[in-house]
Amino acid sequence: MTARAFWFDSTVAVIGAGAWGTVLANLLAKNCREVRLWCRDEEQARAMTTTRVNAKYLPDLTIDPKVRVFAEMERIFESRIGAVIWALPSYACRDRMREAARFFRGDEFLFHATKGVEKGTLKRVSEILKEELPCARIGVISGPNLAVEIARGDPSATVIASHFDEVTEAGVTLLANEMFRVYSSYDVIGVEWAGALKNILAVAGGAVEGLNMGGNARAMLITRGLAEIARFGVAMGAKAHTFTGLAGLGDLLATSGSPLSRNFRTGFRRAQGEKLEEILANLGGVAEGVRMAAIVRAAAQERKISMPLSEGVQRFLEGSVDVHEGIRVLMARPMGREY
Amino acid sequence: MSAQRDKSHPAVQFRQVPIVRGPLDQFEIMRPEVLSSVVQKTYGGYQNGNYDLILGQALYQERFRLKRFRPNVFSKVRKKKDEALWREVQGALLRPSTEVARPELLQKVLGHYAEEIGGHFDPAVYRFAVNLVPLGLSWMLNAASVRRFLPWGLTQSLESRMRIYGEVGHLKKLAQKGTILLVPTHQSNLDSVLIGYLIYLMQLPPFAYGAGLNLFSNPVLSFFMGNLGAYTVDRQKSNEVYKNVLKNYSAEILQRGVHSIFFPGGGRARSGAIESKVKLGLLGTALDAQLDNLLAGAPKPNVYIVPMTISFHCVLEAASLIEDYLAEAGKHRYIIMDDESWQPTKVARFFWKFFSSQSAITARIGRPLDVFGNFVDEEGRSLGPNGTVIDPKLWLTTGGQLRREPQRDREYTKELGKKIVERFHRENTILTSQLAAFAFFETLRKKYSDLDVYRFLRLSLPQRSLHYDEFLPKAEEYRRKVRELEEQRKVYLSEELKAVSTDEWLKDGVRQLGLLHDNTVMRIQDGVIFTEDMNLLYYYRNRLSGYGMSLLAEGQIGPGKDDSKGFLV
């Protein structure tokens, strides 16, 4: 049996029924026998099963009939699972993994679509997966993937990084279709850090938009922002060119200018004067950028890596500096060479 | 467990322990089968290959090697045979394939290599050797020791000179449950002899091991090693055909349950540091062997990788190793053919000094690993996160089938290699001499922090001297650092290093450091501490690189790398 045939006949689990998790389940359904989607909320799971719609996150997307939704982890693993896609927000990762660990056999291919790192330890999600689950073959999915756009069938692309060829090959087989291109990479560290760091800049992108600033400001933010997150990423062991790829520049372009991004909306509303707590309370999901800004500031200071934009975003979010003052400070920094 | 951990294994108290039998005892019977299987397996790997190209490349590299090969009296015969073979291959390749069948030609080459690599094992020689070693050692000891008239002091002294710590019991249990691949750190040519003897002392069956072909040019060594399960590794043969035969030989004997030893660093550590990188080619044969066993449904399929560290106060060949390292003369490719360490007078001198000086050799058996680098429990089961048990079969299953998947397996072996390096550092025992060298070297460096390594090593004698009293607190500061590391379980300290007073451990270290060299590495005289040989000091200091203690170690530079001034971090 070829690898493709194996995956077309396999059952795949998606852990997390947020917007991206639901879209991933639908993408997978086109290329495998069955998808089992885990949803924390029992009521929501029941509603999704009967109405075939994820009313909370994606009311316009009809869920593929091959997708079965469960609220109990043991039900997910009732049948033999070939691959698992982990699509939960980063803050609860380790605890959830610990709960789920006993259901894993060891031969499952693990993918995660979580953009963030662990507070304090700075461990990437793939590292946490390795520490908590008995599986070795792990990949990461990241890229300019606004869930709503993919849900309505717009063309899009993503990148899957893994040290194992068979993992990236499985990811391509399972996810790619005529409107969704999947690239592969060996730079796991780079793809994970790019995906996590760009969220901070997406918040800044929202703020720039919220202040009605033009294209120049946005372009400056993106190019200089990319330079600083790449600097940080390389210090963490990433390859620089990964940051100019889909997971870095690609994702940055998509989210720093799109109201579909929660990070963008957070920056946008904050710039218009709303309090952070109020924004987060009715955002309809998690803004990873807010969490990352705090984590990265501490880490960058410790390592003496210059990250003025991230620093500015953190101060602006926590309210220690007003947005105009923040911009003034950033613009008044000493001039230097571009590279 | 920790209390037990730091007790030397009791086996070393006895001079004579029973010989434990193992699969190597039957080696002479299975040897032809092993070799033909190695040839068939390697040949199978070339199925449908371009034989002309494969043979042509090997021919080119071999002729190049033979041209530069300067044999001695004993290796002359081998060179002649090699030349005859490759002349024949060349002649055959010039004729059309209808006249000379290429598959047969390739098999002939494979057979030639397999025969050269394949070792022998003679139980009688083994018996003789294990009896000879303690006899020889006792003689040395008796002659050298002040207690020569007290025969009962003998065993006790032997015990105190060779210390084995760590997971000895665990290792012995696993030797019953699967095949052991012992991976030690490698500093000296004496390592093979020493490890072989320690294995006997631990009451394990004899192990097979790879030994550099250059060691076989000495007839006495060649006789012993050749009959004690050593197979030859010629690092000058760089062609793919040879490498494949070698890998298949290693996999074949592991698969047949023959416990083996590899030095995963490739050769002796030139810099004196603990291996920061390991060679993955041969290491990968552990996974290959286990997978083949699983596919064949073998009763004891598993291969267990057991790291081992050995700490010396002095390494016989330190001077030429560090010189080689500093010259960077092709690193591992450069093999010193006329090695000073095997001149009989030097060897005798080494043992004499070793025993007259109350010096000790410290070895530690590390926690056993599986072929992926996971820890293994005493039952031989692979441990996953939070103490769960992993079934290795599932990690080797792809597309629902247990099978070989070269890229996947290489990746697993890479992980294993990283884990071995990490364990080497953690299971290492720091000695007083190494810390004394490190502290002195780094304290000097602080004084001359703008010099790069080459200029620094050329400091004049007054420049490389410090007032002993001023140096004491600085040395103690380094001890505080290693103690901290020990508390974090990142390293072990020798008993002497736990002495109460700074003066005590430091003087012990200075006395022990590099005892056998012509130059004293460090000396204390008239209240001044100084070194007579900066290169040797650097060599011994390097043993503590990789622990993040070195001066100017910038942020993210890892072990095995140089800092901005060219010093090993």
Image: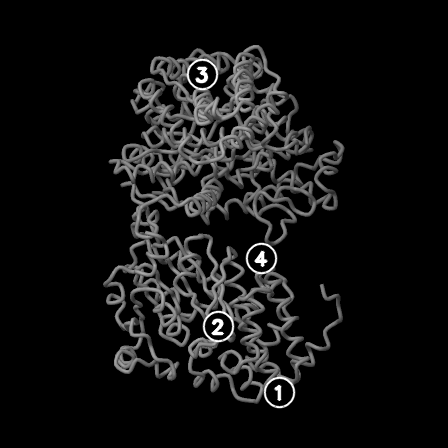
Nearest to viewer (mark 3 / mark 2):
2
- Disc count in the image? 4
Q: Are marks 2 and 4 in contact (CB under 8 Å)?
A: no
| Residue under numbered circle 4 | A239
Q: Chain of mark 4?
A: A
Same chain for marks 4 and 3?
no
Mark 1 vs mark 4, CA separation in Å? 34 Å
Sequence order check: which comes first, mark 2 or mark 4?
A: 2
B84 shown above or below A192 = above
Answer with the quarter of the image where residue A151 lies.
bottom left
Q: Amino acid at mark 2?
A: Asn
Nearest to viewer (mark 2 / mark 4):
2
Q: Amino acid at mark 1?
A: Leu
Mark 2 vs mark 4, CA separation in Å? 21 Å
Nearest to viewer (mark 1 / mark 4):
4
Q: Nearer the viewer, residue B356 or B187?
A: B187
Nearest to viewer (mark 4 / mark 3):
4
| Residue under numbered circle 3 | B137
Q: Amino acid at mark 3?
A: Leu
